[in-house]
Amino acid sequence: MQGHADSVEGLYIWDRTGGIVPALGKAKVRQALNYASDRESIVEKLNLGYATATSQMATADSAWYDTSLESNYAYDPAKARKLLAEAGYPHGFTVTMLDVSSVAPGQQVVMTQALEDIGIKVKVDKIPFTRLFPSRQPAGAMS
C-alpha cells in the first residue's frame, strides 16, 4: 500500500530462501502471503482511506509503475490456504515477526490477523522494533 508521503506498508520477507523458516523458501507460500493481504481493508483501517492499495512498490506516477501488476494477488484467503496446502503446509506453520507495535500498532494487529486467518501462527518477538532501529522512534519517544 502506498500511504502518506509515499510511505509503504506491508509484509517484508527477508528469508526468501527459507534458511530460518523453511516454508518461506517456497514460492507458493510467498504467493499465499500475498493473497492473504486485504490491501483495501488495510487502507481503510490503517490509513483511514488516505492511501492507495497496490500490489507493487511503485506509485502510479512512477516510471517503474506497471499497470498490469495491479491485477496480481487480489485478496483471496481461500486461494492462500490452497497454495499453502500445495506447498506442503496444509495446517500452516509458525513464523516469528518483530514487535513493531511501538511504531505501527495497527499494522501489527492487521498483518498478524491476516496470517492467522490462513493458518500461519505468528509469534511476536518482544524485542521492540525501536531498539533494533532507533532512528524509527516515533516523535516524542524515549529510548
Image (cartoon, rainbow, N blue to C red):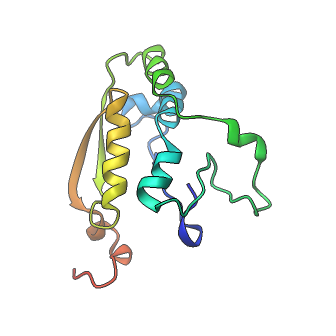
Judging depth in this view, the residue of 77 and 28 nearest the camera is 77
Q: How many marks?
A: 0
Placement of 23 over or under 105, stated as above or below:
above
Placement of 26 over or under 20, stated as above or below:
above
Name the residue: 33% across, 77% down.
138
Among the 4 quarters of the image, the one containing residue 52: bottom right
19 left or right, relative to 2:
left
User: Residue 117: x and y, percent?
Assistant: 34, 31
Judging depth in this view, the residue of 125 and 39 nearest the camera is 39
Name the residue: 32% across, 26% down.
119
User: Residue 21: x and y, percent?
Assistant: 36, 34
Q: Is residue 10 visible?
A: no
User: Residue 91: x and y, percent?
Assistant: 31, 18
Quarter of the C terminus within the rendering: bottom left
Name the residue: 47% across, 46% down.
41
Q: Is residue 62 visible?
A: yes
Placement of 132 over or under 70, stated as above or below:
below
107 left or right, relative to 9:
left
The extreme left residue here reads: 126
The extreme right residue here reads: 63
Name the residue: 60% across, 34% down.
73
User: Residue 84: x and y, percent?
Assistant: 44, 21
Quarter of the N terminus within the rendering: bottom right
Judging depth in this view, the residue of 11 and 96 nearest the camera is 11
64 left or right, relative to 79:
right
